[in-house]
Image: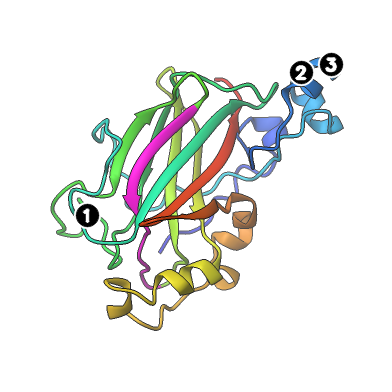
Amino acid sequence: MDKPITRRTSLLALGGLVAGTLGWKADSAESAGVGPAGIASGAVSCVLIPELTEGPYYIAGEKVRSNITEGRPGTKLALALTVVDASSCKPIKGAAVDIWHADAVGVYSGVQGNAGTFMRGIQRTDAHGVAHFTTVYPGWYTGRAVHIHVKVHLGGTVVHTGQLFFSDTLTDGVYKKAPYSSRPNRTTRNANDSIFVNGGSRSLLTVKRAAPGYTGAITMGVHRA
């Protein structure tokens, strides 16, 4: 089971993740002065959140691809993950966004005897700072709330390691259908997940219905290495 990292208690001091919805304002950053001081003063409207552990299932050097399903079943989830500069809230082009998560029945590829590379992939951000992925809504496994792992790399340096979460109400609805319904009574909700309680509420994806599945989005601001 994943355990929370506690060594990074202040992202203003150490540099790390800033995330929020698409409501950040670059203009206010420019007019009030950029940098950590601007964030501390509130002039920059990106929202600071703590970094979260990468967990035991990270595999380096995964495929650069947008569709990471490899044909595995599940409710479609289209992700739009935006990377911005924490000092100005301006989008960063060319950042490598690396994600991995369990499939619909709670299995990770490439570990514990599970073959394949499903639900793993890397995408570069476009001119708008957005990395797009096509995947499925993650399944659950014992001891953890439903989540997606993410790393952001800039110039070969990891500038953020985190986890993205879903509302329990949404998950309850998704899990009423196959293949999720074959595994009822998931063990852990957000409120009793050891990672979520250390900042996960600020890493909730904004999810919308988009037939035949959902779209999920979040903006992640990073301090350039």
Residue corresponding to mark 1 = 111
Q: Residue at x 37, y 58 (%)?
A: 137
Q: Which amino acid does the dot numbered 3 rest on?
A: Ser
Is residue 103 shown left or right of residue 70? Answer: right
Which mark, residue 31? 3
Residue 68 in the image: above or below residue 209: above
Distance between mark 2 and mark 3 Cα atoms: 8 Å
Residue 3 in the image: above or below residue 26: below
Tell me the element at label 1: loop
Residue corresponding to mark 2 = 34
Discs 2, 3 touching: Cβ within 8 Å: no
Whole-percent x, y for residue 219 in the image: 58, 37
Q: Which amino acid does the dot numbered 1 rest on?
A: Val
10 Å neighbourhood of mark 2: few (<14), some, or many (≥20)? some
Is 153 magenta? The answer is no
Quadrant of the image for the C terminus? top right
Is 139 magenta? The answer is yes
Whole-percent x, y for residue 122 in the image: 33, 33
Tell me the element at label 3: helix
Q: Find the residue positioned furthest to the bottom.
A: 185
Distance between mark 3 and mark 1 Cα atoms: 49 Å
Q: Residue at x 74, y 28 (%)?
A: 25
Among the 4 quarters of the image, the one containing residue 91: top right
Kindly report which numbered mark, 2 or 1, lies closer to the viewer in this rendering.
2
